[in-house]
Amino acid sequence: MSWYLPVPQYADKATGTTWRVSRAWFDKKPGNYVLEVVSQGRTRALRGAYLRQGRFELVPLDDPELPALRAEAQEGELITYRPHRRAVVRAEGRYIKIFRPGQAIASAERCARMDILLDAGGTFTTPRILRSSEDVIAFSTVPGPTLNELSEDDYTTSDESFARAWEKWARSWVALLSVPPGNAARSVLNSLPLRSAEVEAAYLWRCVNRWLRHFENVPEMSPQVSALRAAAEDVTTNLLRTAPDPLVWSHGDLHSKQIIVVDDRSPLGLLDFDEGAQAEAARDLAKMDVRLELHRRRNDLSSARYLTAHNQVLAVAQELHVNPDRFHAYSDTIWLREALVPLPGRLAMATAVLDERAKHYQTTEA
């Protein structure tokens, strides 16, 4: 039995289409996976799929947990889909998020209040809510390329304009988190979930235990199981051993695909507030930095552009007086979570990074 996804592509015999796995999650039974897949060929299509005991099967768009999906998918192109959890459709002039029934209400309320927080610094613009229901939210688009798209564009985006875009993000992020919140902004901030280091550690262990349920009884995975347990102990101990930095507003899923460069004169666009919370500034910055390194290691980002963006992240951390120990602790936490993603090569790559980082810390402390 193949306990990890053996290859990134699968053929659907019913349609004759080959699908590439773009994202994967563990299903309930060991050896089974829930997938997001993209068709290979001239016409791009995105779907959900199962891999159960080695058998590949597409998920019907009549997802019983997402009853609005089929109708909303007719409006445009499905661009993100975690079966039974959430989906995003790109349509003309808007993006449509599909949730489980009832789950869109709190998300819409949170997004509607983000302007109160973001207007404090006048540094970011956000999509407008065009319509919402208990399981659907439609947002306006924010025109312009994302920082990620700029990083992949070597033809029309010069290194200088790439650097200016990241400098603008750095100034904007510092300005946003440096402005003391007024009464209205403080009220919004206090209403958000708390993602303290203790909460983060508990969530990490839930992810680790889910991974262990799939692999701890597989003899050939014994070395990886032992190594992962030890890494989880070290990472959580390190996360909790030093005093936390002050809590601030946290985006929760900050990476270069969430930042839009509108034009030179306008504020940057900022997307997706579903994971908004109260947390240490290090949490968002570490997430941004880890994603940049992932892109570099997958050759989606040149080393030179990686350093440009990475140095801006570090500069923001310094400007916001982020304790380097907290930045490193959150970075290790995020790398460990990357090790738990069931995609080919991800476990080996992420654990190798953690080993490199541990040796670097030991050398620095010595």
Image: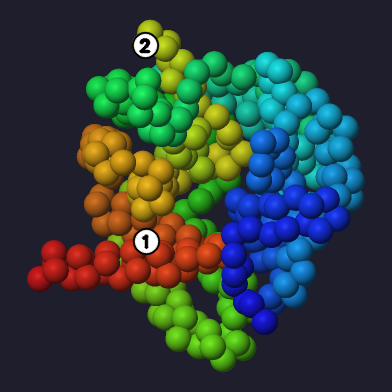
Q: Is residue 247 visible?
A: no
User: Which label sits on residue 250?
Assistant: none
- Characterize the local packing of mark 1: few (<14), some (14-19) or many (20 or more) Cα atoms within 10 angstroms: many
Identify the amino acid type marked 1: Asp
The single residue placed furthest to the top in the displayed view is: 265
Residue 356 vs residue 350: left or right? left
- Residue at 26% over, 50% down: 323
In the image shown, does 339 or 322 lie closer to the viewer?
Answer: 339
Residue 304 vs residue 92: left or right? left
The single residue placed furthest to the bottom in the displayed view is: 219
Locate residue 69, reporting x and y percent: 83, 39
Q: Is residue 277 visible?
A: yes
- Residue at 67% over, 82% down: 1
Q: How many numbered markers are drawn?
A: 2
Label 1 belongs to which residue? 332
User: Which label sits on residue 264?
Assistant: 2
Which SS class for mark 2? loop
- Residue at 86% over, 37% down: 70
- Residue at 40% over, 65% down: 349
Locate residue 269, reporting x and y percent: 49, 22
In the image shown, does 63 or 249 lie closer to the viewer?
Answer: 63
Which SS class for mark 1? helix
